[in-house]
Amino acid sequence: MFSETQKENLLYRTLLALVLIVLAAALRIAPHPWNFTPVGAMALFSGAVLKDRRLAFLFPLLALFAGDIFIGFYKIIPIIYASFLISVAIGLWLNGRRTVARISLATLLGAIQFFLVSNFAVWQFFGTYPHTASGLATCYIVAIPLFWNTLAGDAAYAALLFGGYALAERYLPTLQASRQRASAD
């Protein structure tokens, strides 16, 4: 099925992707503006790059959990984690077709779905806003500045993750061989 070289190449690619994900996860606990974190980009990247779908979904969850050990746990954690799994699924759409336009669209979609899901959860599970249509609308309106931070963080970190990985694919001999074989097939 796979030659020894292809297996080795897949291992190197997976290790590189996991290292980038770990670095992104570590940045989550560093001081940053509200919602300007690498988590959304990390989830997209995981879905787009990791060939093993189980790892693609599991690793961002483990990274989130590790970060939450330091940041703290909160009431809507299952919903937030589910939202990032949606971002992993959006990343799967990029798999094998990573262009700047597609990564940009995926980043925008990931930020929008996180905004919609997380703020709905805030409205539903915290007593901050009345459980009415106008309360929900207020919750979303008040959170608009956080959306821009989410989008900016996702865009910046997506550029770093996907760009760094593309540079590695281009310049590291162990990753080049597979790429050249894939384009020849």
Image (cartoon, grey):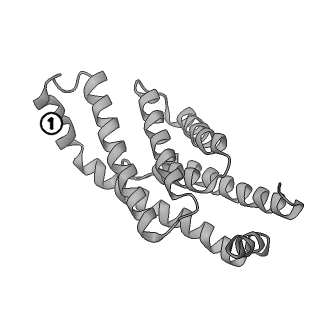
Q: Position of residue 118 (x, y in %)?
A: 34, 36
Q: Residues within 10 Å of mark 1 (few under 14, many from 20)?
A: some
Q: Is residue 102 visible?
A: yes
Q: Nearer the viewer, residue 6 or 32?
A: 6
From the image, tell me which residue sits under label 1. Answer: 138
Picture layout, residue 116 above or below residue 2: above
Where the C terminus falls, by quadrant? bottom right
Judge left or right: residue 52 versus residue 3.
left
Q: Is residue 30 visible?
A: no
Judge left or right: residue 52 versus residue 173.
left
Q: Quadrant of residue 125?
A: top left
Q: Quadrant of residue 142?
A: top left
Numbered circles on residues, count: 1
Q: Position of residue 160 (x, y in %)?
A: 53, 66
Q: Residue shown at 86%/64% (left/top)?
A: 5
For numbered disc 1, what is the local secondary structure? helix
Q: Which residue in the rendered view is the most extreme toward the left?
A: 134
Q: Position of residue 32 (x, y in %)?
A: 43, 52
Picture layout, residue 158 above or below residue 130: below
Q: Position of residue 96 (x, y in %)?
A: 58, 62
Q: Amino acid at mark 1?
A: Thr
Where the N terminus falls, by quadrant? bottom right
Q: Nearer the viewer, residue 183 or 123?
A: 183
Q: Residue shown at 28%/32% (left/top)?
A: 120
Q: Residue shown at 89%/60% (left/top)?
A: 4
